[in-house]
Image (cartoon, rainbow, N blue to C red):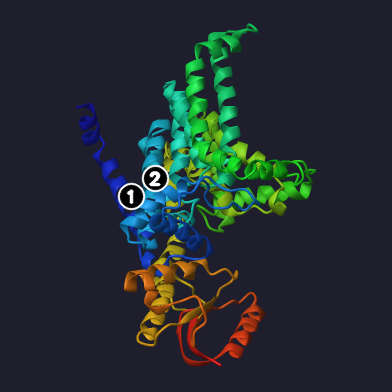
Amino acid sequence: MKKIKNFFQNWTSYLLLTIVLIAAFYIRIYRIDDLLGFYYDQGRDALVIWRLWHEGKLFLIGPVTGLAGIFLGPFYYYLITPLYLIGGGDPVVVSIFLAALSVVALLFLYKLGSEMHSRTAGLIGAVIGGFSYYIIYNSRWLSNPNPMFLLSMLFLLSLWRIVRDGEKKWWTISLFLVGVSLHFESASAFFYIPVFIIFTLWRLLSVERTNTILSDGWLIRFVKINRRVIFHTLLAFFVTLIPQIVFNFRHENILLNNFIKLFTRDNAFSKPLTFFILETRIDYFWNVFMNKIYIGWNREAIIFSSLVLGALIVGRKTLRKAVIGLFMIFLLTPMAGYILFQGNFGNIYDYYMIGYFLPFILLYAIGLAELSKTFIGKVALIWFFVIFFRVNMIPISGIFKNPMDGPTDIKFGSQVRAVNWVFENAAGRGMYNVDVYVPPVIPYAYDYLFLWQGTKLCGENLCGKVDYQTPILYTLYEQDPPHPERLEAWLDKQEGIGLVEESVKFGGITVERRKRN
């Protein structure tokens, strides 16, 4: 009854939120069947799922990370397997599902904003997250980091509930989410571990101050009182690591040895910190976070970020208890970690921080909501959204206008058309081979597309496609603007194998039927 009353009292907020979520979902799936990026990683993952589906090959590890020899856990594969089954192998169905998860993350963003500050903060956060071009771009990405949008919100929610309610079950849920996140994007989730540790120490010290317990035996007594919670929490985390642990022992400690090597021989955190590295990292953090809102409008980013920071500082005493402290731990911990981290040849990419995009937007939204308490602040908020939609709607509109068939475009729709052209052209010609060139050389995407489409059209015989040499050869290649010499060398090799009898283009993809010499 209370929830029904609350709904009618705040129906405008819920109506606006519903509109935002529906519009955000629509943009995330619009033309996804044409414009989906389906390349090396996506083909590799789809082939793993195909083998599970058709051959019953279970797996204990997931995709490889950017660090040599370090693999993610398998939960991403098991998450998307049912969607491949439902869609009959269609990657578009999986992509729509992942887009839906990113919209659910916006719902939790709204919930957290409402609990931490106000419904205004929740709505502001949902709007920014819903219509930020780069959040949309990553939400349309068929890849394992995508679910981190939702996991980051759930992890932050669990920490917040510990702060707000003190319910012990949230400790277990929180560390379980840390373990699950390690199956999706290690670069983000790795720093969830120190976030959890620092948060734990912060809460223990807060409890100590509250109870004025200063004796040396305080921590020991705390452990004794909460040992059941501690046991369940550590067990929940351990359960998420079981697949990797089993894989590691079955393969002569390969994962553990590679992890140790990262911190010893590769010196991931032990190289001296220089001013150049510090300056580069600060610039990285600024661009990573601000581009999710302003996309290169640096002056406006500085102005509004200063206003938001000022609103948070001035209003810190009126904000709900521990909100600022929680965000400082959640956002500053990974930033400090990446300032010190110099592994992976010193390279860090935008998506490494994907587990912190929405939490940052939430903090920004809380600052904007706090700013809007005054008349001038309301004017500033309106001006913020004018700028926000102006800078984000231009690239978003590109999603609606993207031609797909540009001379260098490699999109899923064109890839499927190219593959199906081979099957149609080969009909009635007998057995044939296919040779594929793609940068970076390994054509996992086309391996899967030929397998999927061939099975769908003709069953196990793949419409006559075989691996051994036949008189008919189809060559399929993508344009390679950064390295045209590699493509030219490959084409020269094909000229020595067979003569082109027919050729057709699909965007940046060329398909040829050749007759062997």
- Residue depicted at 24% across the width and 39% down the height: 11
Q: Residue, x 55% and y 47% (percent of image)?
A: 72
Q: Quadrant of residue 27?
A: bottom left
Sequence-wise, the earlier of marks 1 and 2 is 1
Give x and y (percent) for residue 452: 39, 67
Picture layout, residue 113 above or below residue 501 = above
* Residue, disc 1: 21
Q: Is residue 140 visible?
A: no
Can you identify the residue that label 2 sits on?
Answer: 106
Q: Viewed as shown, does residue 201 lie left or right of 369?
A: right
Q: CA distance from mark 1 to mark 2?
A: 7 Å
Q: Image point 49% across, 88% down: which residue?
A: 471
Specify the quadrant of the image occupied by residue 429. bottom left
Check if mark 1's residue and mark 2's residue have beta carbons within 8 Å: yes
The amino acid pointed to by label 2 is Leu
Against 227, residue 447 (above or below) is below
Query: Dot 1 surroundings within 10 Å: few (below 14), some, or many (20 or more)?
Result: many
On the rendered image, what quadrant is the N terminus found in?
Answer: top left
Q: Amino acid at mark 1?
A: Leu
Left or right? Give the position of 102 relative to 246.
left
Above or below, 493 relative to 186: below
Q: Position of residue 220 (x, y in %)?
A: 60, 11
Q: Position of residue 5 (x, y in %)?
A: 21, 30
Numbered circle sitting on residue 424: none
Label 1: which secondary element: helix
Answer whether residue 335 is visible to the viewer in this image: yes
Decide if residue 215 is on the left or right side of residue 277.
left
Mark 2 Cα-neighbour bin, 10 Å: few <14, some 14–19, many ≥20? many
Position of the C terminus, as image quadrant, is bottom right
Q: Secondary structure at mark 2?
A: helix
Residue 486, percent from left and from top: 65, 78
